[in-house]
Image (cartoon, rainbow, N blue to C red):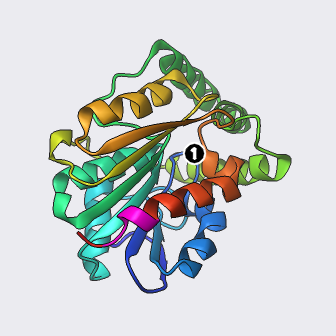
């Protein structure tokens, strides 16, 4: 199946890939400015998020993105990925380098990354809450962990709704996504690797090391940001993305 998505506009394609704390609604603030800047904008929900149902068979988020590009007739696109969406963007860029014109990675995960003790403790606490049936507690843990100090009450409530929906859907899951091994040296797209000073160490470190892994990447750390800068300071993050895409999003 083709994952649920929105598409609008014309010009160079930009695909927005969401964090696993959110769904495609996390890009609401970036949607119209990207359209106004002359891009064809796509955003999608991975399986078990937003409007894309669970899969009954093993699946691959990265292959789902490639299938969506093919379905829409998009031969090349810039990918903007947050957290899990950033890891998927990197995977897509390694699997089909010629299809990715640019990568903007916001607190991205990275294929093959071994979680730190801090991240393992978070995951263990989340599992404990879910196993105890305290879904509200698990949602609150995620909101508190992943949003930085700039996030206001409205943003926190938006993330709470998206995370709660994901938990409600995924509680019925019997299969999960395949884990793909990829060679990141195959990535050719110019890359902006953004970290947040208030984020967990894993994602700050990934953003910092990506320029040593990818042939054409630069690192930027935002001193005000947590894990979800596009929600915490949407206007500033949108301006950052537009500035990067202006020089890098055209078809190669």
Inspect this view and state whether residue 221 appears: yes
Q: Single out the residue that lies furthest toward the top.
A: 117
Q: Magenta stretch: dominant SS?
A: helix
In this view, 155 is above or below 79: above
Residue found at x 33% / y 43%: 217
Relative placement, left or right, of 219 versus 223 is left
Relative placement, left or right, of 226 versus 121 is right
Magenta span of residues: 246-250
Residue 232 position within the rendered picture, expressed as x and y whole percent measured from the top left: 70, 47
Disc 1: which residue: 21
Inspect this view and state whether residue 176 appears: no
Residue 15 position within the rendered picture, expressed as x and y whole percent measured from the top left: 42, 66
159, 213: nearer the viewer? 213
Residue found at x 62% / y 46%: 229
Residue found at x 50% / y 55%: 18
In this view, 235 is above or below 251: above
Relative placement, left or right, of 133 versus 62 is right
Residue 109 position within the rendered picture, expressed as x and y whole percent measured from the top left: 41, 37
Location of the N terminus by quadrant is: bottom left
82, 126: nearer the viewer? 82
Question: What secondary structure is found at the residue carrying circle 1?
Answer: loop
Q: Single out the residue that lies furthest toward the front.
A: 247
Residue 33 position within the rendered picture, expressed as x and y whole percent measured from the top left: 61, 73
Q: Single out the residue that lies furthest toward the right.
A: 153
């Amino acid at each position: 199946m083709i994952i649920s998505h929105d598409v609008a506009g014309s010009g160079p394609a930009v695909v927005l890939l969401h964090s696993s704390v959110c769904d495609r609604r996390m890009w609401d603030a970036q949607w119209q400015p990207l359209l106004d800047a002359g891009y064809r904008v796509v955003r999608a929900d991975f399986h078990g998020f937003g409007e894309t149902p669970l899969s009954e068979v093993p699946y691959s988020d990265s292959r789902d993105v490639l299938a969506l590009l093919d379905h829409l007739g998009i031969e090349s696109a810039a990918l903007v990925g947050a957290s899990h969406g950033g890891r998927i963007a990197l995977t897509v860029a390694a699997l089909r380098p010629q299809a990715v014109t640019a990568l903007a990675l916001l607190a991205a995960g990275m294929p093959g990354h071994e979680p730190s003790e801090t991240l393992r403790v978070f995951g263990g606490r989340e599992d404990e809450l879910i196993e105890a049936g305290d879904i509200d507690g698990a949602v609150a843990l995620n909101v508190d962990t992943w949003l930085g100090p700039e996030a206001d009450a409205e943003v926190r409530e938006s993330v709470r709704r998206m995370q709660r929906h994901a938990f409600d859907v995924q509680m019925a899951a019997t299969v999960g996504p395949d884990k793909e091994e990829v060679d990141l040296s195959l990535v050719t797209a110019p890359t902006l690797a953004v970290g947040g000073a208030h984020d967990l160490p894993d994602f700050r470190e990934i953003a910092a090391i990506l320029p040593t892994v990818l042939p054409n990447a630069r690192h930027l750390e935002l001193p005000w940001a947590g894990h979800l800068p596009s929600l915490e300071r949407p206007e500033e993050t949108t301006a950052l993305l537009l500035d990067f895409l202006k020089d890098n999003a055209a078809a190669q």
